[in-house]
Image (cartoon, rainbow, N blue to C red):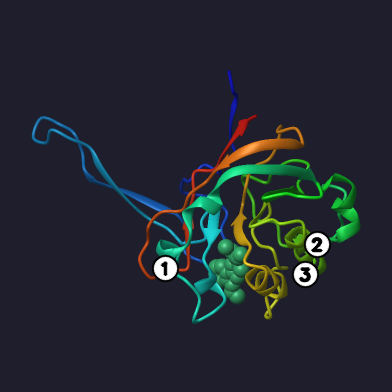
Amino acid sequence: MSKIWDISQLLRPGLPVWPGDSTFETNAKWVLDSDCPVNVGQFQLSTHSGTHADAPLHYDPMGLAIADVDLDIYIGPCVLIDAICAKGQVEPEDIADQLPNRVERVLLRTYAAFPHDHWVEKFTSVAPATIDLIASRGARLIGIDSPSLDPQTSKTLDAHHAAHRCSLAILEGLVLDGVPPGNYELIAPPLKLKQLDASPVRALLRSI
Ligand SMILES: N[C@@H](CC(=O)c1ccccc1NC=O)C(=O)O
Ligand SMILES: [Zn+2]
Ligand SMILES: [Zn+2]
């Protein structure tokens, strides 16, 4: 029997978001009572809320929108690598020992404990050389538990552009607490959002 790990953040009011970005809000459009047979909610959120997939359109005006990306990248074998010891940026030497020679998808864990209730300004990002290394092993997707591949203060998004050059899809904001490093099946397709730059995902790992 395979085990499933839910590696998604809980979307709720109070969810920490990128400084200045839209907060996650909910509202009851209809409320079930003697006059109304159903509950119907509504919610408002940033495309980069919680656990999400970036589309190339996020950092390239000519890039694909999230509705148009190849879905099979988000489903299939992956390796989860422990990079908790990395300081500032995940450098190639932080993961070299754990990175298989051939790999399809790579997930990096940087938090010892995921910060569910507050925004961490100095999260761990990924060195562009690490992106190149992962891509050189055949990967088509990189995922990370921090909110971005690049530092919060970056204006050039070098790691995002490196990923784009290498045709690597990007997942961010994964919750990897309690998941042992190793091989899994990833299931994390984005929503089919026309002309948008990213999408929340329900990200799952299945043991193999
Ligand atoms: N690059 C980040 C997000 C990002 O940069 C961002 C997200 C929301 C609002 C503003 C952002 N960047 C502004 O410079 C990411 O990949 O999710
Ligand atoms: Zn993003
Ligand atoms: Zn990103």
Q: What residue type is labelled 2?
A: Leu
**Residue 77, horizontal then vertical, whole percent:** 63, 42
Element type at mark 3: helix
Q: Which residue is drawn at 88% across and 52% down?
A: 96
In the visual, does 34 lie left or right of 189? left
Image mark for residue 196: 1
Q: Residue 133 carries which label?
A: 2
**Residue depth check, mark 2 versus mark 1: number of the one nearer the observer:** 2
Quadrant of the rendering where the C terminus is positioned: top right
Residue sitting at the far top: 1
Name the residue rendered at 88%, 53% in the picture.
94
Q: Residue at x 42, y 68 (%)?
A: 196
Query: From the viewer's perspective, is 130 left or right of 67?
Result: right
Q: Is 108 positioned to the left or the right of 8 in the image?
A: right
Q: How far apart are marks 3 and 1 (CA)?
A: 25 Å
Q: Report the image quarter containing ligand 3.
A: bottom right
Query: Quick one: quadrant of the N terminus?
Result: top right
Q: Say what secondary structure mark 2 lies in.
A: helix
